[in-house]
Amino acid sequence: MNNPLPTMQEAAQEAEFQLMAAKDVLEWQHALIKAINLDHLHDGGKGIGTLFEVAKYFSDTGFGGVYSAIEQFKVLGESAPQNMQPENVARIPLGDFAKGRQSIAARELGVTQVAISKAIGAGREIFVTRHADGTVTGTETRPFPSVTVEGCAE
């Protein structure tokens, strides 16, 4: 089986669909049980053979989709990165991250394009990390103590 793993969202959507289908089957089985009971009470059980065939069909089709969705979640859970360590996270210098796309980079970081341009122009040491959920954060490294504009140590 060389199919690519579905995304968590795709697996969740498939699981939801399969659970709704299973719910429908359970409701149909409940209605079938009531029909068998009514046939027994009011018609002496003459239609039970046909109703039994319908019950057998439900049993044969069963919950294969539910089992498949459960297996997909199991495989996804086993393949998901566990406790990613910070040293495994790529830190990209702001200049590289924003090269040719300052407006997009600014939007992702929640700042203005001008702020990106000024930070790069000033040579500030800012690194951008893209997280597993797609969000990005910027971290600035500065020497300590740093010297402020007035020449005082912070």
Image (tube, rainbow, N blue to C red):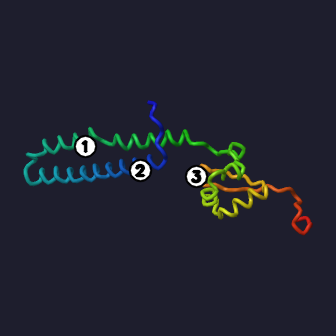
Tell me how far mark 1 sits from mark 3, CA to CA. 43 Å
Which residue matches tag 1?
58
Label 2 is placed on what type of residue?
Gln
Which residue matches tag 2?
13
Q: Name the residue nearer the viewer: 107 or 22.
A: 107
Which residue matches tag 3?
134
How crowded is the residue under tag 3: few (<14 C-alpha within 10 Å), some, or many (20+)? few
Is there CB contact under 8 Å for labels 1 and 3? no
How crowded is the residue under tag 1: few (<14 C-alpha within 10 Å), some, or many (20+)? some
- Mark closer to the observer (2, 3): 3
Residue 59, located in which quarter of the rendered image? top left
Q: Is residue 69 left or right of residue 47?
A: right
Picture quarter with the N terminus: top left
Above or below, 104 against 75 in this view is below
Label 3 is placed on what type of residue?
Gly
**SS for dot 3:** loop
Disc sitting over residue 8 in the figure: none
Q: Name the residue nearer the viewer: 80 or 102.
A: 102
Residue at image point 74% right, 54% down: 126
Residue at image point 56% right, 42% down: 80
Q: Name the residue nearer the viewer: 132 or 59.
A: 132
Residue 125, located in which quarter of the rendered image? bottom right
Q: Is residue 131 left or right of residue 7?
A: right
Q: Position of residue 154 (x, y in %)?
A: 88, 65
Of mark 1 and mark 2, the one earlier in the sequence is 2
Of mark 2 and mark 3, the one earlier in the sequence is 2
Above or below, 56 against 135 in this view is above
